[in-house]
Amino acid sequence: MFSARSISLVLLLTFSFLSSSCYQDKTCEFAPPSAATATTIPEGFGVNINFTDPRAGEMRMLADGGFRWVRMDLKWDETEKEKGQYDFSAYDRLLAAQQPFGIRTLFILDYGNPLYDNGAPPRTDATRQAFAAWAVAAATHFKNRGVLWELYNEPNHSLFWPPEPNVQEYIALALEVGHAWRKSVPDEKLIGPATSEIDFDFLEDCFKAGLLEYWSAVSIHPYRHSDPESAAGDYCRLRELIKIYKPKNSPAKEISVIASEWGYSSVWRGFSEEKQGEMLARAWLTNIANGITLSIWYDWHDDGLDPGEAEHHFGAVSNSYHENREPVYDPKPAYVAAKTLTTFLSGYRFESRLPADSDDDYLLVFRKGNELRLAAWTTSSAHATVLPLPARQYTVMGHLGTDQRLAPADQRGLTITLSNSPLYIR
């Protein structure tokens, strides 16, 4: 680490003025989080899971990887098997298993129930009212436990809102839930709509309908095969929409943006497990530098072993569980990248992006008190660059915690070689 006092005040002010975020576009206003509201690493990072009863050692390994949240479906059909009778005991067990490790929960209120309209998405008045009553019952059951409540999962995708998405149907459901929520559990945090990708048309229709009155955050799933840094412009555009439709009667209300699901399959064309790990680090760094308050990686472990099935290979760890062994899953590079990032930057907050010779170069500064650390990479081909740092010895480390070395800076600064894999500097 190095002291903020060791860098001239003029230099730091220049850095902050020139580049306070990852996204630089004069047509799109971006206000970086203040020191008081910026997320402290690793509190803004989590992972999707698909269980309520973790296996022995699983939660410990998850926490050791730097994941501080889990995102999990709280399914309507599994918790209301008789009309008006609710059983959340499986989810009680999940929260109990998380508690010793300080892991928080994002529950997704989702899907249909065969007791109502044969399990179709909630699109009739009676079914929407039943869904809202169930949602409020869940929030009441887990009240004051720091749960984030997400209204549905990818309602703009036909897989989750068959036979085809209908934004007006979703809006009607969200308004029904919002009204019931405000009346019964106003202090619980409700977010939405968890769109597949960043569906601006769907999102704007939701905002026009007044759903920001009820949501404390907007959640999206910014999947892409391209570089994660390309999401920065989308985030800025989304913030502009939120600004336009923000409730006029609550001008001080903060509505954050959450990436509640995002990952890269290690068997996509042109990908590998090594590249997947690189993408996790870059996606998380991009998100935190753009004020995304929570980043949920998809997925915790691989869903299967088929080398030709992309859905089987989003995991941070491999598929097979190893009882009575440490670790209980084989960590993939994505897990190692998460653990390295959250360990190196533990307790730090994003401060600024330093100016560079190319817009393709990312030089991010993080602060903890008077101490600063850097993350640096490029989206172009590998090349050398000079960081304008005071002359002394620095420690440089790769994104997997390897290749740690001492690097001296001279009067010009610190010369490093940037590549697509982030470097961490202290």
Image (cartoon, rainbow, N blue to C red):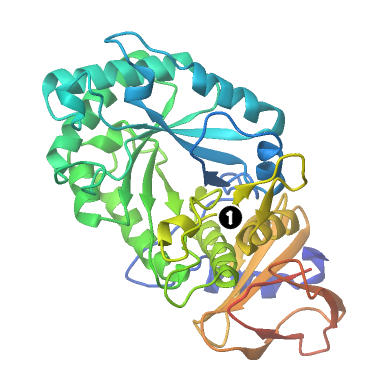
Q: How many marks?
A: 1
Q: Is residue 143 visible?
A: no
**Which residue is nearer to you in this view: 404 or 365?**
404
Q: Is residue 420 placed above or below 331 in the rendered structure? A: below
Q: Residue furthest front?
A: 306
Q: In which quadrant is the N terminus drawn?
A: bottom right
Q: Is residue 280 placed above or below 244 in the rendered structure? A: below
**Which residue is nearer to you in this view: 378 or 1?**
378
Q: Hey, which quadrant is residue 324 in on the image?
A: top right
Q: Which residue is mark 1?
A: 316
Q: How crowded is the residue under tag 1: few (<14 C-alpha within 10 Å), some, or many (20+)?
A: many
x and y percent of residue 183 in the render?
31, 15
Q: Residue at x 50, y 23 (%)?
A: 91
Q: Is 220 left or right of 7, judged from the image as shown?
A: left
x and y percent of residue 401 in the render?
75, 66
Q: Residue at x 50, y 68 (%)?
A: 22
Q: Is residue 114 visible?
A: yes
Mark 1: amino acid: Ala
Q: Is residue 126 placed above or below 226 in the rendered structure? A: above
Q: Is 339 left or right of 90, judged from the image as shown?
A: right
For label 1, the SS is: loop
**Which residue is nearer to you in this view: 216 or 140?**
140
**Which residue is nearer to you in this view: 281 or 362?**
281
Q: In which quadrant is the C terminus drawn?
A: bottom right
Q: Residue at x 52, y 63 (%)?
A: 283
x and y percent of residue 29 in the render?
37, 63
Q: Residue at x 24, y 56 (%)?
A: 200
x and y percent of residue 381 in the render?
55, 89
Q: Is 167 left or right of 373, judged from the image as shown?
A: left
Q: Is 285 left or right of 165, judged from the image as shown?
A: right
Q: Is residue 286 placed above or below 405 in the rendered structure? A: above
Q: Hey, which quadrant is residue 96 in on the image?
A: top right
